Amino acid sequence: MQLVKIILMSERAFLFFVGAIILSALYFSIDLVIFGLCLWLLFEGMTNIRLTAVTQKIRHKKLETGLTQFKRKLRFSFDASRAWRLSVSLILGGSFLLLQVYQVEVLWFVPWFMGFAIMGAGASGMCPMLLFLRWVGFR
């Protein structure tokens, strides 16, 4: 039964694992993992083929997101989790690229902050960025 829960990934577990991957890659200085994660999140955001949805469809089970949500007036028909994936991939990838390639040392804290914030959002179930995107009007 525990294997099924591991294979089925909720959005909350996904956030925790993404944050853990970011922090691990930063700690061990594995730059390709950060760039690969940014490309993966960019792909998921552009195509809406999400790992969480695919694993749930394969197992024919539906899991709740596990994240705090509230109802607001929808202004855009674009999903908030897609917008989150796009913004994270662009901010993380852009800051990491500026840091590693162009040695803009002022940005060293951005990837670390994002890693801790995303992992904390997965642990607590409350992602401020997703709440903000829903408040703005994303679906």
Image (cartoon, rainbow, N blue to C red):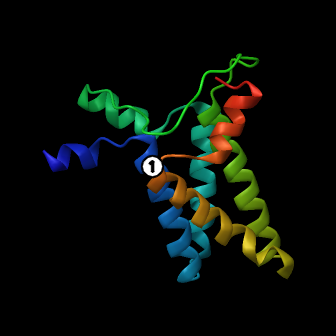
Residue at horizontal 56%, vertical 67%?
A: 22
* Residue at 39% in and 34% down: 54
Q: Say left or right for 132 vs 1.
A: right
Viewer can see residue 102: no
Front-most of 66 and 30?
66
The amino acid marked with disc number 1 is: Phe
Numbered disc 1: secondary structure: helix
| Above or below 84: residue 95 | below
Quarter holding residue 77: top right
**Res 118 quadrant in image:** bottom right
Residue 11, image x and y in percent?
45, 41
Give coordinates of residue 41: x percent, y percent.
Answer: 59, 48
Q: Which x, y percent locates residue 6?
A: 26, 49
At a point 39% along the width and 41% down the height, the residue shown is 10
**The C terminus, quarter of image:** top right
The residue beneath circle 1 is 14
Which of these two is toward me, 104 or 11? 11
